[in-house]
Amino acid sequence: MKKIGLLLLSASLLSFIFLPKESVTVYLIGDSTLANKAIRAYPETGWGMPFVYFFDSTVTVENHAVNGRSTKSFMEENRWQPVVDQLNEGDYVFIQFGHNDEVPSKVGRYTTPDEFKANLTRYVVDTRDNNANPVLLTPVARRKFDEEGKIVGTHDEYSEIVRTVAREQKVPLIDLDQKSQALLQQLGDAPSKMLFNFLEPGEHPNYPQGSADNTHFNELGARKMAELVLAEIRTLGLPLADRIVVSR
């Protein structure tokens, strides 16, 4: 009888261990630095595009980020509510804004610091109200170096607001501004161009006049930024980390 009991217990434990993971969806909301790009924009690439391929089959990534959007315009254009309506328990919402919120000349998109904080808080609350998991990201760095070759922060005020909201709301924070600045500094001024949409005239048919873009990434840059996000998912110990595909 003892042997039968042990066998039944072992079978029960094995069935528990090998239960399939429930599927989850990761929603990305934000601006052009992570958005999907039209073919006419290539080689410009948002970091959300390669991010899709780093997870196992239990994870679906839905990239709702759109070029030029801020925390304000994303809601006003009714881009947020459809995400909220789809959220299921255990899903994730990665929230990365700031590039457009912080620019006063961008009419209809600019948000004051107080508005930015309030909007981020709403995204967090709405996500939690639907039993999903918010993750806040500071805006990814622009490529800007001073005369001494030191990286210069271009989102300091708005990145700090994201950190404040994460702290006050007890939300996991991926400090992508800080991490991407560190990567650019490691590479240096001229070499860091290889991550951005820099093209010589005639080099690509989509940019016959060339491109010198210090904000948007090429395919390599997008993958490097996605890798920074993935590394932080692991560092934070998010359950999602167990679903990241491990290269062999």
Image: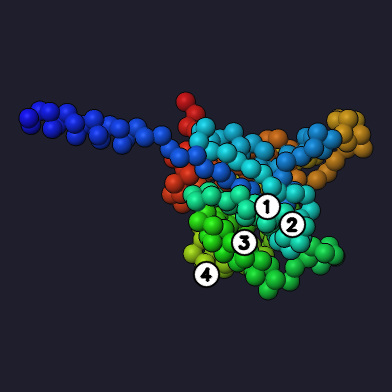
Task: Report whether 186 appears left or right of 244.
Answer: right
Amino acid type, mark 2: Asn
| Distance (Cα) linking label 4 and label 3 | 14 Å
Label whose residue precedes the other's in the sequence (2 or 3)? 2
Q: Residues within 10 Å of mark 1 (few under 14, many from 20)?
A: few
Q: How is the image coloured?
A: rainbow
* Residue 200 appears in the figure: no
For label 1, the residue is 82
> In the rendered structure, which disc, 4 or 3, sits on the residue that comes first in sequence?
3
Q: In the rendering, at what x and y percent does residue 61 appear?
A: 60, 41
**Residue 181 image label:** none
Q: Which residue is mark 2?
A: 78
Q: CA distance from mark 4 to mark 1?
A: 26 Å
Q: Earlier in the sequence, mark 3 or mark 1?
A: 1
Which residue is at 68% across, 52% downward?
Answer: 82
Extreme residue in the left direction? 1
Q: Is residue 243 left or right of residue 62?
A: left
Q: Are marks 2 and 1 in contact (CB under 8 Å)?
A: yes
Query: Where is residue 70 drawn, in percent x and y?
Result: 74, 59
Q: CA distance from mark 4 to mark 2?
A: 26 Å
The quarter of the picture where residue 12 lies is top left
Q: Which residue is mark 4?
A: 168
**Quadrant assignment, res 153:** bottom right
Q: Tell me the CA gap for discs 2 and 1.
A: 7 Å
Identify which residue is drawn at 13% across, 32% down: 5
